[in-house]
Image (spheres, rainbow, N blue to C red):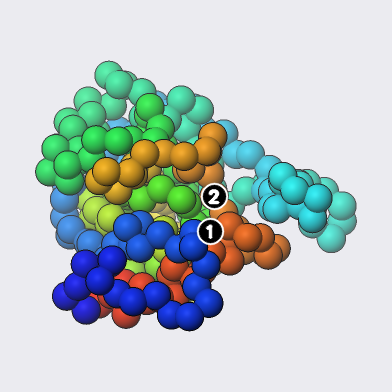
Amino acid sequence: WKKAPKEVPRPAGVHEYLKPEFWRDTEIIRGFGKGLGIYDEVVPKAEWLQPMADGAAFSGGYRLKYDREGRMRPQGNQHAKDGLTPGRFPKLDRLAQKLLVEQSIDDRVLKRPGLLWYPDGSADAIEHRHEAWTALLSFGAPRILTIDKQPVLLRDGDLIVFGTQRHGVPKMNLDGEAFDEYGGRISVVFFFMPTGQQAKGADPWKAIRDDLPSRKAAAMLRDADLGGPAQLQGLQ
């Protein structure tokens, strides 16, 4: 690889909306916030909400998802009502400031980072992607995060930074144990734009799922395929 994105020639037939400036390798910083007790600080104080699962609709927009009995299906994880509220979690506030400085994150897409809670191993996140880049801190029990279907084990305090790759959190348990016996985990999510790029559209942070084809999803899949070798090197 060892090339700037714009040095890579575009194959014939690639559409004009291919954006190599949005490519980036995955970066993992082990133990960035290890041993600070942040999981125990955050979980009791946050107001957790569990929205209903949704997905892309044929007519555009989103539709709710239902189980076989016709009941609305809850999303696999919970999120804090007000995100990372300044002053509520002092230790996490200090770590978040350290992350923003060391990663030189300026153009944040959300005013407040998101907080997600996976109470046990049965909580999950289906594969999706975002138009923005992601910096994610993980606290609590170890959990797998998949990046373009490649598994990455995140332990307490680990930081991972990636681009527009598809990602998700599968269910997890130990051998011989049930999913609901596995420990809980939270993730703190920062969405931001590449250097020199401005957020376009109303919701660049919004999850893009590939359960139905769309022009936007197809374009981003092509981006991921062309940048695949570099992304895989970042996971090694």
Instruction: Using the rendered view, name the quadrant where residue 98 is placed.
Output: top left
Q: Is residue 32 rendered to the left or right of residue 76?
A: left
Q: Earlier in the sequence, mark 2 or mark 1?
A: 1
Instruction: Using the rendered view, name the quadrant where residue 105 is placed.
Output: top left
Q: Amino acid at mark 2?
A: Ala
Residue 124 visible in the picture: no
Could you tell me which quadrant the C terminus lies in? bottom left
Q: Which residue occupies 37% across, 29% down?
A: 112
In percent of width and height, residue 101 lies at 14, 37
**Which residue matches tag 2?**
207
**Which residue matches tag 1?**
128
| Element at label 1 | strand
In percent of width and height, residue 144 lies at 39, 66
* Nearer to the camera, 27 or 201: 201
Could you tell me which quadrant the N terminus lies in? bottom left
Q: Amino acid at mark 1?
A: His
